[in-house]
Image: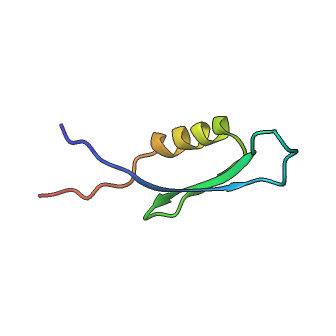
Amino acid sequence: MTESARLFTLRLWPAADTRDGDPPQWRGKIQSLPDGEAYNFGDWLDLIRALEVMLATRPEETQEE
């Protein structure tokens, strides 16, 4: 059985200013490498959904003869 690995970049940044004492809200972008498929997200649930979509499709694998 062959296992394949996937490589992603994850970029996070704080959203607009929050009130003092409130935890920061985060936004982000996840991108699959090297194909460049990318999703922006506004919360952790959106990140998980994007990962599920990206992992459901397998990158084309080169067949060895």
Judging depth in this view, the residue of 2 and 29 nearest the camera is: 29
Q: Which image quarter holds the C terminus?
A: bottom left
Judging depth in this view, the residue of 24 and 21 nearest the camera is: 21
* Residue located 36% across and 55% down the image: 60
Q: Which image quarter holds the N terminus?
A: top left
Q: Is residue 20 left or right of residue 65?
A: right
* Residue located 38% across and 51% down the image: 6
Q: Is residue 44 left or right of residue 10?
A: right
Instruction: Classify 37 as above or below 18.
Output: below
Residue 29 rendering spot, x and y as whole percentages: 62, 55
Tell me the quarter of the picture where residue 22 sits. top right
Instruction: Classify 42 as above or below 62.
Output: above
Judging depth in this view, the residue of 29 and 15 nearest the camera is: 15
Residue 49 rendering spot, x and y as whole percentages: 60, 37
Residue 36 rendering spot, x and y as whole percentages: 52, 64
* Residue located 64% across and 38% down the image: 44
Q: Is residue 22 left or right of residue 26?
A: right
Residue 45 rendering spot, x and y as whole percentages: 65, 34
Q: Is residue 24 left or right of residue 4?
A: right
Q: How many marks?
A: 0
